[in-house]
Amino acid sequence: INGKNRLVPERVKRSLQSAFDRVLRTYVIPSGLHSSVARIRPSQSGPAKTFRIILKDGQWIDVDLVPVIEFRYPNWPSGIEKKDWMDKISPVDRNWFLVPKSPMSEPAMPDCSHLWRLDFQNMENRLIQDYGCVKPIIRLLKTTRDTYKWNLSSYSLKTFVMHQLLAKYDRGYWDPKNQGILFIKVLESLGHALDQSGPAIPFLFHPKMDLTEKIKKPTKRNISGTIKHIVRKLRESPDRCCELILGESGMPAPPDDVTQEAKFIPYVVHQTENSGGAWALVLD
């Protein structure tokens, strides 16, 4: 807590990291025939404390622990407009979180160290649930991104597909049998979006915020040009899809970020205040 009784995200992260480091120093991995764990390797990435659990057979499991503050419906952050599609989601799943990470867009204030990032993970997951090929298309976009080393975050690609889904909110349209042609359509739309003025990939819950705003225009244009080339080749020679998506080797490129699904640990506070599109926490 700082001098203004605000809960500072960086201090929360450090506190969590310190607690886990203390546990790891004293934790002894069980031995014997019934233990499948060889060792545990910790690391820090953004707000997440990652534990890579390396198994004796050489495989591993990544577990991310993120300290978040959960708010439940009907509580709703001011400045975030409610959309019609949200009414289709159960109130139980309309919870949202504050994550100890800097806002996506830089606020117009000298000191923003007390600001937390909004997260609507549950609502996003319910939005794309049971919509046929939506999740596979997101994975294909990420694979293509990794192959060509585009400076696009996984979340921005997921958000772009969610926008495409809402534009055609029909389960029949997203039937798995349409996956090939829809992937090309979504990829083509992404190329056009990156080549236009204005927000290329608006944040789903705050459309004025562009998830690509930190990417320089020449970089966006280069990515757009590559996408248009891929789309043209896919339409000319569909049989080259593995080569075009996975690269010359036909094998997916290893992603820079191996982090898998995050597991959230909620904290509780009493009061919140809006601060220029991000959120600050103030203790009573």
Image: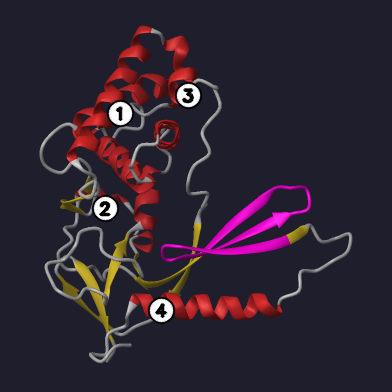
Instruction: Please say if 89 is above or below 21.
Output: above
Q: Secondary structure at mark 2?
A: helix
Looking at the picture, how far across and down is residue 180, in whole percent?
Answer: 41, 20
Q: Quadrant of residue 173?
A: top left
Q: Is residue 271 above or below residue 103?
A: below
User: In 3D space, how far apart are the residues under numbered discs 4 and 1 (Cα atoms)?
Assistant: 39 Å
Quick one: label 1, few (<14), some, or many (20+) residues within 10 Å? Answer: some
Q: Amino acid at mark 3?
A: Gly
Q: Is residue 50 magenta?
A: yes
- Disc 2 to disc 3, C-alpha distance: 38 Å
**What residue sits right under mark 2 in the picture?**
86
> Observer-nearest residue: 138 or 12?
12
**Residue depth check, mark 2 versus mark 4: number of the one nearer the observer:** 4
Seen at 43% across and 74% down, the residue is: 13
Point out the image quarter for the N terminus: bottom left
Where residue 219 appears, as percent x and y from the top left, is: 24, 37
Amino acid on which the number 1 mark rests in the picture: Val
Q: Nearer the viewer, residue 88 or 270?
A: 270
Identity, as a three-letter code, of the amino acid under mark 4? Val
Q: CA distance from mark 1 to mark 3?
A: 19 Å
Give the number of the disc on residue 247: 3
The numbered mark, 1 or 3, whose residue comes first in the sequence reads 1
Which residues are the magenta region? 39-64
Instruction: List the residue tagged with mark 1.
Output: 186
Point out the frontmost of discs 4 and 1.
4
Above or below, 270 relative to 52: below
* Residue drawn 20% across the image and 33% down it: 193
Q: Earlier in the sequence, mark 2 or mark 4?
A: 4
